[in-house]
Each structure stands twice: as C-alpha cells, then as structure tokens.
Amino acid sequence: MNIEGAIGEWRALLGAQCVLTAAEAQAAYGADTGGAKRVIPAALKITDSGDLPEVVRIAQRHGTPLYPISTGHNWGYGTALPAQDGCTIVDLSGLRRILHFDAELGVVTVEPGVTQGMLAEFLDAGGHPYMVPTTGAGPSCSLLANALERGYGITPYTDHFGAVTDLEAVLGDGSVYRTALRELGGEEVARLFKWGIGPYTAGLFTQSGFGIVTRMSIALARRPECVMSCIFSLADDSLLEPAVDRVRHALATLPGTVGGINLMNRHRVLAMAAPYPAEAVGADGLIPPAVIEAMGRQYQVAPWTGFATVYGTRRTARAARHELRAAFRGIASRMLFFTPQRARTLSRAVRWLPGPWGQRLARTAGTLARSLDLVGGRPNETALPLAYWRSGQRPAQGALDPARDGCGILWFAPLVPMRGESARRLVDMVAPLTRAHGIEPLLTLTSLNDRVLDSTVPILFDRGAAGQAAKAQACLKALLEQALAEGFAPYRVGIDSMGHLAAAMTASGRFSDLLRQAIDPQRVIAPARYAR
C-alpha cells in the first residue's frame, strides 16, 4: 500500500483542503459510540460526485482501500469507522443535492449527504404533502445510507430500501454502475419502477462493499389526512405472548392502515422518561429490581408499553381505532389515542402544573408530542437522548451527537418470528445475558410486517469509564452467539461483528466472494464490510 503516493494524487485532484492526514482523519472520524478503534491513514472530503471514479482509480493504482460514509452518524454500529484498519475514509456528506423531485408521483432523488432534516426542509418549503422516511437516529442522518443498510422506520413505508427505486454507484475499477432502465434511456421510468428489466442487481449494493453509491431515488409516502397513535399498557409481564399474537392479527387485519407496532419493556420506557438513577445502582453496577418497580409506579410505566400508529382518512382512522380496541381487548389497559395536534395541546397545557409530579407529566407529554411528530414523518431528536442515559454530556445548545458527546451505545438487533413464544424466548435470552455483563436489559419489539419482529436492544454503558467498552462489546458478542444458536439472526450488525457473521455464511459468503472477485478483485471499496 502506497498511501503517500495516493495522497499526492488525491490532493492534485480534489485540492489539499479536501485531503486529511492520518492525524486529522483520526480527530475527525475516530470517535465511536461503541468504543471501537481503527487505524485511519487518510480521509477524503468529496464535494463533486464526478471526482469519485478517479478517486477510486487512484486508490486502485496505489493499493489503498477506501471506506465510504455518508454523514458518519451510524450510531451504535460503528459511527464513521471502517470495518477494518487501513482504509481511507471517503466522506460523502458534502454531496447534498436533491437532484430530482417528482411532486406529482412522490419520488425524490438524493445524494448521500442529504439528511432527513434537509428533505423535511425541502418538502416544507415547497408545500409538498409527503412524509420523510424518519428513523430514531435523528435529523442529521443520511437517507441514502439508512436505505443501503436496509434500515426501517416508523412511517407507512417501513422498509426503507423497499422504497428505493433506482441508484447509481462507482465500482472498484472506477466505472459507473447504472440500472438497466436508465441504461436503456428510461430515466423517468427507472425512478418509478424498482425492478427494472433483467436480473435485479441494485440490491447488491446494500450491506456490502460492491460500490460507492452516489445517488438514489426513493418513493415517499403521501401525508395522510389523519395520523393517530395508540398507546397502551400490559399490566403484567405474562401478557407479552398474547400481545404479540394480537399485534400479528391487527397488522394482518389492517394492512396499510396500521404502521409499525412497538412493544417496549419497562426498562426501555424508563430510559426515555426518567433520569438514570445513579445513586441507586447496586454493587453489580445494575439498577436493583425493586428500584425499577418503584420507578415504574412513579412514572406510571407498566411492565410492557405498546405504541401503534394509524394512517388514513379521518373515517378510516376512526374505524381502525375501533378495530385496535377490539384486537387488544382483555389484555391492554390504559389504551389512549392521540393525534399530533392533541399531543401538542396536552404538552402545552401540563407545563403549568406545579411540583415534581407536574414536571414528570410535562416531560412525558413533551416526549409523546415529539414522538407523534416523528411517526408523522417530521424528523426530530426525540429518540436520541436514549444514548445519553448512561453516559455522555448533552450540549447546552445545538444538535445532539452521541459520538462527539461521549455516549456509550451498541445495538443488538435480532429478527424474531411474529409468535408469542418466540418473543418470550428472546426476552428470556436477553435479560440474563445483559445482566451478566452489567448491562441493563432494555428491549423493544417492533413489527416489520405481520410475520416478523425486529428487537432493538441498546447496550448502554459509560464510555468514559475504564473497561466499560470492553464489557459492552463482550455483551454484544455473547448476545449474537446465543441468538444465532437459537435461530434469531440479526438484520444488521456493527463493524466489529461483520467478520464474525460473514464467517458463518458459507454458501452465500462464497457467492459474495465470487462477485467481489469479478468486480473488485483488489478489494478497493469497503473491504470486510459484511464480508470475510
């Protein structure tokens, strides 16, 4: 690897100000919420996608692997770090153009640096009645990168890559990939029809290092007449199994009307609603069960909390509300329905209530209002404070940045069949394993459809305390190994888990290796990303 030779050529191509040395790159990109470390020899700031083919050819000539990032806000999965040492970071956050928008059919074409917040501003400025495909990661995160990671969200188009219709990428030899319909001159229909013609190859660029994606077209959900959220409680832990079966029934009965349904355990909700009780932590570093019970009573948080969203006309929303009440009758208590407008009104009203009880209610009402805006396709930071629950210093003003602010968080995200007994097996697996590693068992079960759940388990730790990152990483490794043994494969993993996972994939891994050997034999782009 001749990094000095590559840096010289990159400076001539991009300008010296766009090429960072190893020390500069480490300072700019080295912080990770999971405590991972990487050797970064350089970083490139790209401001024109037309420069990328030559950037890649230079890397190929000098044997210097590249690792593209969009905004580098991959919290809990590696932040901005490469999957292996020695990769030059290719920062695409400067590519911020919205290249095309079909206001009639609702398809937007964006570059990698376009964030949820930028798209929201664009749609609001034009008065366009479409929803941003939001996630809990916050307004500063890339739309394109989340879709490439096959992320999912909480608006009607839950599967974000499922909403992608077209993309373009630079390959490991510097050539440019375009989909078949675009090659045939049908740029408009390429933006409108996902599958194109002939073999479907665009999906190869998701969760892979097969190319640097420079543009993507995404179909947006139209903003409905009514957005209504339902919050309910499960008063006993034993109600989890029937609740999961009722979730499956509700989704199958009301397809397209009910969005994703979440079931969150008490620990998870308290991490959103209450300060971390550092003074009550036991000798094992965990919050004692009696304290969790007391906090649950104080904040009115049941063993499990459900959250569902309804999209449609006012008439269909009223009908769906009736169906949801019927679906969860006998197991759900305190079932409440809110529109964003009603939640904002409640949030304003309770600000005037006195005392600690009023403050707690105001905090809860504010979180509810922001959560409803999020499911309504308006990005915000309401979910990001979770990363700060155990560690991190929240800024007095400005955007939240968990990596910059010292937060410790990793994600464990297994897929779970939509059956009550499967959900129980997962819970019974996660709780003792996390506790054994000194990690609080925070669990969410989120429906991806009426057949499968994804469980997002945040592994929160004090990144500033010696040895805590290693304990958190050991916890994640133990969870992954046990989950695979029990048939709960993850839908995505972080940079330190990619090699372990890839090693277990024999037939599919060999197929990926053959493809990579054909299109990028020198492993120039993102080596070790979901690969052996």
Image: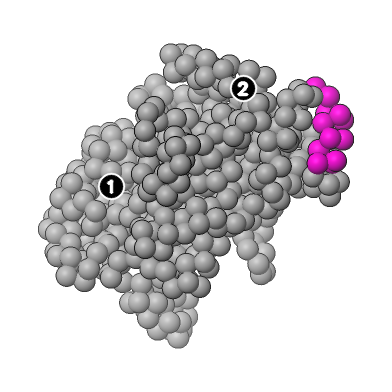
Q: Quadrant of residue 421?
A: top left
> Which contiguous range is marked in magenta?
1-13
What is the secondary structure assignment of the residue under circle 1? helix
- In the picture, measured across the screen, residue 237 lies left or right of residue 202, that is left
- In the picture, measured across the screen, residue 205 lies left or right of residue 23, that is left
Res 520 label: 2
Which residue is at 47% across, 72% downward?
Answer: 126
Q: Locate residue 491, reporting x and y percent.
A: 42, 34
Magenta stretch containing residue 8, yes or no? yes
- Residue situated in front as seen by the camera: 156 or 92: 92
- Residue situated in front as seen by the camera: 383 or 150: 150
Locate the N terminus by quadrant: top right
Image: 444 above or below 322:
above
Res 237 label: 1
What is the secondary structure assignment of the residue under circle 2? loop
Which residue is at 30% across, 66% downward?
Answer: 224
Q: Residue furthest front?
A: 185
Image: 246 above or below 272:
above
Which residue is at 62% across, 22% downward?
Answer: 520
Name the chief secondary structure element in magenta: helix
Label 1 crowd (10 A; few <14 / some 14-19 / many >=20): few
> Which amino acid type corresponds to the residue marked 2 in the rendered image?
Asp
> Which amino acid type corresponds to the residue marked 1 in the rendered image?
Asp
